[in-house]
Amino acid sequence: MDELIFPKKEWRLTNEQEELCNLSKNLGSKRFSKRAFKYDSEASFPVENYKDLAEKGLLGICVPKKYGGFGADLKTYMLAAAEIGRYCGATALTFNMHVSSCLWTSFLIDDLKLDEEIKIEHERLRSEHYKRIIQDGKIYAQPFSEGGAAAAGFKAFGTNALKVPDGWLVNGKKIFASLSGHADYYGVLCSAIRKKDECGSRKNTMYLAVPKNADGVSVEGDWDPLGMRGTVSRTLVFRDVFVSEKEQLMPAGVYPEAAARWPHMFMTLTPAYMGIAQAAFDFTIKYLRGEVEGMAPVKRRMYPTKQLAVAEMKVMLEQTKAIWFQAISEAGPDPSKESLMRAYAAQYTVMENSNKLTQLALRTCGGQAMLKTLPLERLYRDSRCGSLMLPWTAELCLDKLGTSTLYEEGESD
Ligand SMILES: Cc1cc2nc3c(=O)[nH]c(=O)nc-3n(C[C@H](O)[C@H](O)[C@H](O)COP(=O)(O)OP(=O)(O)OC[C@H]3O[C@@H](n4cnc5c(N)ncnc54)[C@H](O)[C@@H]3O)c2cc1C
């Protein structure tokens, strides 16, 4: 049985963190790892894995305890999700979309200074949303990408929510909507407008739960990508979809402030790739020791070239784990500039090193290791997708690190 990626003693985990990591690891190693090949080859959604997550209560990992969830904070969730990513990247990536809907609506918002009336209303609405997750096993997606600068954080969302009596009429399109056709609710970021021809603004961003079967919702286009195939991230189209007032996941206009004050939220896609990095390393060790299940026990560990490559992988894995663990340990509202830069550096490191580790693993293990019957080839393809994730793509992290390092706030040339 694999050890935790971050064992309790060395990484000073709490009992709760260890417990959730073990729960995730056991599901991953005993069940998800065996199904990963099928989801990848069929580009089908991990439906069975989600049943298991619901059964173990993990759909409510970040639902506050008073609503029946585990009440995990950002760091605890990230550690547990990395254990899932180790066995099925697509499950971990989509799990992030679901869990984010709980994080945005729970302690992130509790930290903001809101009018008492708004707080009471939010409490009423979120308790309904958590009840669906805990009691009915409902799943939430988080489609915000639109193919333009909105998902990168530079412009207002093009998807609009026009105010009408008792709710909103939503119109727009979201690309790469993971869990499309499988989530029960789409947690859509959109711009609130009062008139049909009004231009949305970022400060009027709304976060609404659009029910999967609402009139006017459609899932379009095919899905045959390089990697993360089990995410089924097809295009979602909303045509005059009526969304009732009770589906508001955050009070109007609050999202931009929450996002600005809690930048570590944008690291929540990294656990899937931290898990993949660990998986590539684990596989390489087993392969070189001749211990891969179902394969002839041929040992390759005695060759100095293999030993050197494994040493290189170990260094890269430890560096990746260290910066990631430090960055997620710092997650909280209003981080210092240094802390924010560390978060960008950690995001960049995990996304890029995850792919570098799978490359090294393939080169080192040799020819047979790239066969589709073994997981390495899937890990290699899945890992390549990490750096493309907005708003913190590898490029944008470098961009922000470059400017933040050379300029203080308000400075220009
Ligand atoms: C497997 C997978 C699953 C995904 N799941 C989801 C999901 O569930 N929900 C979701 O919302 N998204 C999801 N995404 C989308 C992801 O987060 C990105 O939004 C998407 O990959 C961007 O694709 P694009 O072609 O629009 O990118 P790009 O063209 O690279 O970026 C889009 C726009 O961002 C701006 N931009 C990009 N790079 C820069 C730069 N360096 N400087 C300035 N501006 C820049 C530009 O305006 C550009 O037109 C997923 C992606 C993948 C691969």
Image (cartoon, grey):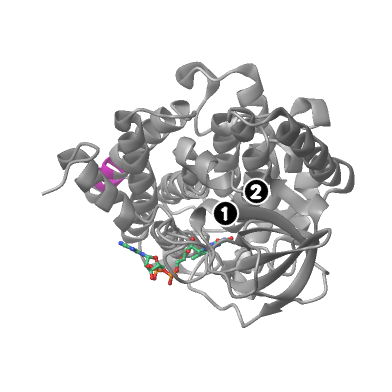
The residue beneath circle 1 is 204
Evaluate whether residue 43 shows in this view: no
Left or right of 136 on screen, residue 186: left
Mark 1 CB within 8 Å of ligand 1: no
In which quarter of the view is residue 240 placed? bottom right
Q: Residues within 10 Å of mark 1 (few under 14, many from 20)?
A: some
Residue 284: where, in percent of width, then height? 41, 49
Q: Is residue 30 above or below residue 337?
A: below
Q: Is residue 58 magenta?
A: no
Image quarter where ligand 1 lies:
bottom left
Q: Residue at x 32, y 50 (%)?
A: 397
- What's drawn in magenta, residue-wise? 306-312
Frontmost residue, 249 versus 339: 249
Disc 2 element: loop
Q: Residue 391 at what x, y percent from top left?
A: 43, 55
Q: Who is closer to the viewer here, 253 or 296?
A: 253
Label 2 CB sits under 8 Å from any ligand 1 atom: no
- Quarter of the image where the N terminus is located: top right
- Going by the image, does 118 lie left or right of 390? right
The label number, if any, that marks residue 351 in the structure image: none
The percent coordinates of residue 249 (x first, y second) are: 71, 47
- Observer-nearest residue: 216 or 220? 216
* Three-letter code for the amino acid on which mark 2 is drawn: Ala
Q: Which mark is residue 252?
A: 2
Which of the two discs, 1 and 2, labels the residue nearer the N terminus? Answer: 1
- State whether residue 77 appears in this view: yes
Q: Nearer the viewer, residue 207 or 399?
A: 207
Q: Say if mark 1 contacts mark 2, CB within 8 Å.
A: yes
Q: Quadrant of residue 239?
A: bottom right
Q: Quadrant of residue 24?
A: top right
Q: Is residue 162 left or right of residue 173?
A: right
Q: Callout 1, which amino acid?
A: Asn
